[in-house]
Every structure is written in C-alpha cells, then in structure tokens.
Amino acid sequence: MGGPSGTTNHPMDPKGRVTFPAKYHREFHDDLVLVKSIERNYPSLSIYSREEYDAYVDSFFESHGGFNARSASHVRLWTRLYKDCTDVNVDQAGRILIPVQLREYAQLEKTVSIVGVRKYVQIWNPDILDRYMNDFDEEDDLLDLP
C-alpha cells in the first residue's frame, strides 16, 4: 500500500472528534486501529489498518523466527504493542473519536496535526510535531545519507 502523505491541521471538538481527511479515508477504509507511538519523548498516535498493524507487530519478531508464546520477553512486547490498541471508526461526518486516555497521552488539545506516512497516519499535537522535526533536523547523524 502506497498511501497518501502530507500534513493537515484540524480542530478537535470537546468530545475528542476530529475530521479524518478524505484523502486518508479513501486509502484507510474500515477495520482501523489507533495506537500510541513508541517514541516516548515525542508522544503521538498512529492509525493503521488492522492488517498493516498486525504486520508491523510481526516484524518485531521476524529476526527471532516469529512470535513465541513461551518467551516472556515476546509476550511482554506483544502485550505492550497491543494493550493500547483501540478500534477506530470513521463516522457519517468523516470524523474519528480519539478516546480520552489517548488524547491525554499525545497531549492533544484544540488542534491536531494529521500526517500521512504511506502505510499509516500519525496524529500529533502541533507543538510536539514541530519540536520533533526541529530535533530531527539538528541530529544529522540519524541516517547515513550520501
């Protein structure tokens, strides 16, 4: 799946509903999951198709021959990756509801930034996204680009 890219800002209503842009909704249909980012210094949320998220979780175990239910470390990581997974539905008005505990985690307030990153969509507090991008720009050793 190629998926759309780019950033758009949207207001979030007091109930935690935010418009899910049509360009993403066309690509990410039903059976969506909302999860916490794994980057604790820059909290955000991500929306995946269930299939794409399962593949993402499986990728953590590929180098170990796949998930092993008898491995305590595998079970702990599996639990970490699935425990805050929330099903997401796009309502008739094209909005998604972000549960309170996930809004608090990502420090979402009145406006959110929605970023398409090919296979999933990120939801950010705009100030945290700016800090994340500024910190990334300052750390030129993150990637060995020619």
Image (tube, rainbow, N blue to C red):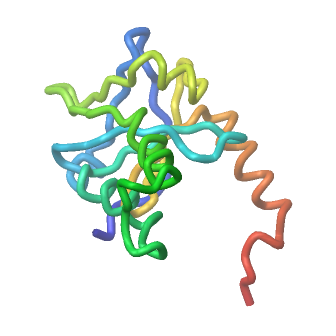
> Residue 61 at x, y = what percent?
44, 66
Give the residue drawn at x 83%, y 63%.
139
Exactly how many numbered labels are in the figure? 0
The spot of residue 69 in percent (x, y) is 35, 54
Q: Quadrant of the C terminus?
A: bottom right
Which quadrant is the N terminus positioned in? bottom left
Q: Which residue is more in the foreground, 72 or 120? A: 72
Viewer-proximal residue among 118 and 40: 40
Q: Position of residue 55 (x, y in %)?
A: 32, 63
The vertical placement of 7 against 18, above or below, is: below
Query: Would you identify the image quadrant in which residue 81 lies?
Result: top left
Q: Residue at x 76, y 58 (%)?
A: 136
Q: Is residue 5 above or below residue 32?
A: below
Q: Is residue 97 visible?
A: yes
Residue 8 appears in the picture as rendered: no
Q: Residue furthest bottom?
A: 146
Q: Find the residue positioned furthest to the front.
A: 70
| Left or right: residue 93 compared with residue 35 | left
Residue 8: x and y in percent read 47, 43
Q: Answer with the quarter of the image where residue 137 lies.
A: bottom right
Instruction: Identify the residue shown where x is 71% and y is 47%.
Output: 132
| Residue in the picture at 37% in, 69% down | 66
Q: Along the horizontal axis of the image, is 112 left or right of 85?
A: right
